[in-house]
Amino acid sequence: MTHHTLDYANRIRQQGYRLTPQRELVLDAVCEGGGHTSFDEIQRRVQARAPAVNRSTIYRTLEFLEKLNLVVVAHIEGRTLYEIAHARPHHHLICSRCGAEIEIDETMLTPAYDRIAERTGFVVHADHLVLSGLCGECNAK
Amino acid sequence: MTHHTLDYANRIRQQGYRLTPQRELVLDAVCEGGGHTSFDEIQRRVQARAPAVNRSTIYRTLEFLEKLNLVVVAHIEGRTLYEIAHARPHHHLICSRCGAEIEIDETMLTPAYDRIAERTGFVVHADHLVLSGLCGECNAK
DNA sequence: CACTTTACTGCAATTTTTCGCAATAACGTT
DNA sequence: AACGTTATTGCGAAAAATTGCAGTAAAGTG
Ligand SMILES: [Mn+2]
Ligand SMILES: [Mn+2]
Ligand SMILES: [Zn+2]
Ligand SMILES: [Zn+2]
């Protein structure tokens, strides 16, 4: 399971929080499938294993996991999508014409981060951006 | 009024849409105050002039104005904030420790856009990003 | 100005998300 | 292993946001 490498159990407990079955179930649900997952899909997966888990709990748990940087969120074309946080952050390019999605590594943004740090002293630490624009193909037209 | 410079009336009509009093009221409401405005504040301003304007209409209108690039949105610390679109896009740096907000020009990001275009062919056209990280002061500690 | 088309609005109903609170259970301590 | 503290859950209710639809009115035409 992907998130095991992050040692989420200790990460949660070391901050004074508790590792509950609900939190493990939600974490697993976000992991399954690997990519972006909607709330409904997460709820479906969680309740397939434990039907009693409450919808409110899933909302609160996702917010919690996001706060601990175990899960990242993205708003893409009106939809709110969740994804397990990986060791290295990544970002998304969304073509506003054809909808194509391209994934890029955080290193693509470091030139801008450097400029920002130079001029403002601010050190950017973005972990899941969504940048819109036009993909190569659509741009050619 | 700031948005008049954008000639929003023609911009709306030229695409087959209609310029309604409700749309002007919402646009004005987003303009007033200049910066980021919450939905509730927009509703308050609109209904101060025209109490009959429906809440649903305001939601739909904001979405519409966003689609036409007359208004930009941002999700900052859980809040959804609206702002009138200016001639040049700008972005925000939010310190995740002290909450400080720094505004930056789009030119700060062009080095990254260039790299992205070189390697992927994708031309980024982001108009209102929110980047989190640590401000200069918080970083020193 | 009267007329036609159909984009847009207001309203009510749904759906989604948040919230308060009493009951539960995680986990450090004994 | 039993106990105590209190973070977390489930539940019901409230609040926020979305949707379908019938009526309204913007704007082009003559
Ligand atoms: Mn992603
Ligand atoms: Mn702004
Ligand atoms: Zn494209
Ligand atoms: Zn700071």
Image (spheres, coloured by chain):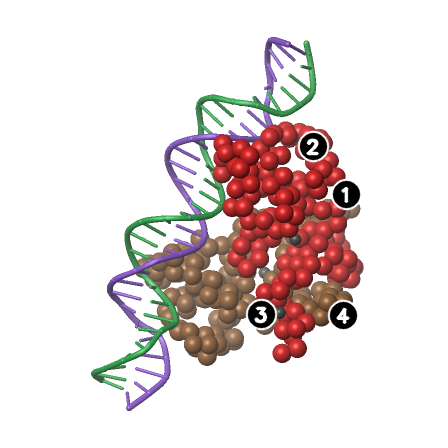
Chain colours: A red, B brown, C green, D purple
Q: Residues within 10 Å of mark 4 (few under 14, many from 20)?
A: few
Q: Nearer the viewer, mark 4 or mark 1?
A: 4
Q: Are marks 1 and 2 on the same chain?
A: no
Q: Is mark 3 within 8 Å of ligand 3?
A: yes
Q: Secondary structure at mark 2?
A: helix
Q: Amino acid at mark 1?
A: Lys
Q: What separation in Å lies between label 4 and label 3 (alpha carbons)?
A: 20 Å
Q: Amino acid at mark 2?
A: Ala
Question: Which residue type carries mark 4?
Answer: Glu
Q: Residue at x 69, y 69 (%)?
A: B122
Does residue D23 sit above or below A58 in this rendering?
below
In which quarter of the view is residue A121 placed? bottom right
Tell me if I can see residue A79 in this picture: yes
User: On the same chain: label 4 and label 1?
Assistant: yes
Q: Residue at x 67, y 62 (%)?
A: A102
Q: CA distance from mark 1 to mark 2?
A: 28 Å
Q: Is residue B115 left or right of residue A68?
A: right
Whole-number angstrom distance, CA of label 2 to CA of label 3: 42 Å
Q: Chain of mark 1?
A: B
Residue at figure coordinates x 75%, y 60% from the top left: A108
Residue at image x 60%, y 35%? A25
Q: Nearer the viewer, mark 1 or mark 2?
A: 2
Question: What's the amino acid at mark 3?
Answer: Arg
Residue B45 pos. (x, y %): 41, 59
Return the mark for residue A9.
2
Q: Position of residue B125 (x, y in %)?
A: 64, 68
